[in-house]
Amino acid sequence: MKSDTRLQHTKVSHRAHQTVNPPVEKGSSLLVKTRAELYGTGTVYGRMGLGVQRELEAALRTLENGTHAQLTANGLQACALAVASIARSGDHILIADNLYGPNRRFCTRRLSAMGITASRFPPNLTPDALERMIKPETRAIVLESPGSLSFEITDTPAVVKMAERFQITTILDNTWSAGVFHRPLELGVDLTVQSLSKYAIGHADAMGGVVVTRSETLAKKLQACANDWGLGLSADDAYLALRGLRTLHNRLRQHERSGLQIADWLANRPEIDSVLHPARSDHPQHHLWKRDFTGACGLFGAILRPVSDVQLDRFLEALKLFRMGFSWGGYESLLIPSDGQLKRLKEDPILQKAGPLLRLHVGLEDVDDLMADLGGAFDVMAANA
Ligand SMILES: Cc1ncc(COP(=O)(O)O)c(C=O)c1O
């Protein structure tokens, strides 16, 4: 054989060592021996994922207490897949008004191009009022609890109970709880969605998403839709998500502790109008959080008392540990002014707030250092009054 042929066929036998973690198998073509295998029902192409993706799916099924997990390349794809696997042209869906913005945009703009209409509802609408929005063609209700900008907790069991009477599928974006502090499938939700880019991966160095269910029928729909669209997660990113899951509970405990400490400290600062943190007793749906959640992550909101744009800019520029950037769930603290992302129904109470809305992600740094960082930036803000 010539050199170029030989170069394509060098081989050593792999799997010589038993490592703690699965090998990151990379592959598009999977070699089979027979025609029956090639056209059989097994994994025959790399797009469907290989060993490390199967292990990650198993871990995510355990985390969310589901029976089927479908991976995607990011969280937004998971949100989109969940809805699109159920709704058909001519259908209608109901979406909570606190959904992650791009998910809300998918449900309105993209689905409308596919002949599916969406109506928005305030996340704390009573089940009776929500029921009045149901049409004969309503197929799904999409929730995010708490909302990742405005932090309302929905009465999910009540929505589920009502949806079940109409055989409407319920979907809940569970990214805030990371599957650790909230188990929507145990409350009767049909599909739970997570952006793995946040706490699961936990280091802001990769992206991923997942939809988990307990329903065989919905699992088949999810898988068919994912296959039709060619959705999946790369082996490298699946590996990072699997590795992140092993320390998820430990990290979240610190995010929770530090997050609450900073939320309480902020609530007593003169610069702050109010804090939006479901685990605080002054949160309007604290009772629902206490009933349906077992903890809180490091993401919450704070509303400033009115300040000028210049003061807000100087405050943001003075922060050294809290840096500005989208996403959350990594080891690092982040803070963004989040008004720009809030595109709510006009009657929404959060629009009546006093000053700018901030979103904080409290990372794994020392909490005293984080408070000193915020305190120093408040001083700069005051000096620019
Ligand atoms: C609540 C929530 N869901 C879904 C997503 C989308 O995840 P990804 O960034 O992995 O696409 C985000 C991203 O910020 C989010 O905050």
Image (spheres, rainbow, N blue to C red):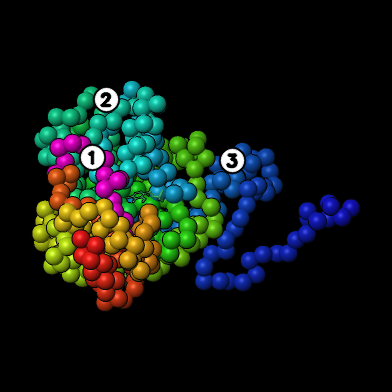
Image point 26% across, 67% down: which residue?
A: 380
The residue indicated by pointer 3 is 40
Q: Residue furthest right?
A: 2
- Can residue 161 be seen here? The reply is no
Q: Secondary structure at mark 1?
A: loop
Q: Verify whether residue 348 appears in magenta.
A: yes
In the displayed structure, does residue 49 sit left or right of residue 362? Answer: right
Q: Nearer the viewer, residue 22 or 279?
A: 279
Amino acid under disc 1: Arg
Q: 172 or 112, which is in the foreground?
A: 112
Rounded to the nearest whole Å, what is the CA distance between mark 1 and mark 2?
25 Å
Q: Which mark is residue 137?
A: 2
Q: Residues within 10 Å of mark 2 (few under 14, many from 20)?
A: some
Residue 305 horizontal/vertical position (percent): 16, 56
Res 8 label: none
Q: Quadrant of residue 203?
A: bottom left
What secondary structure is found at the residue carrying circle 3? loop
Work out whether residue 206 or residue 290 is closer to the camera in this orientation and state it: 206
| Residue that appears at 65% across and 70% down | 16
- Ranked by sequence position, the earlier of labels 1 and 2 is 2
* Magenta residues (range): 335-349
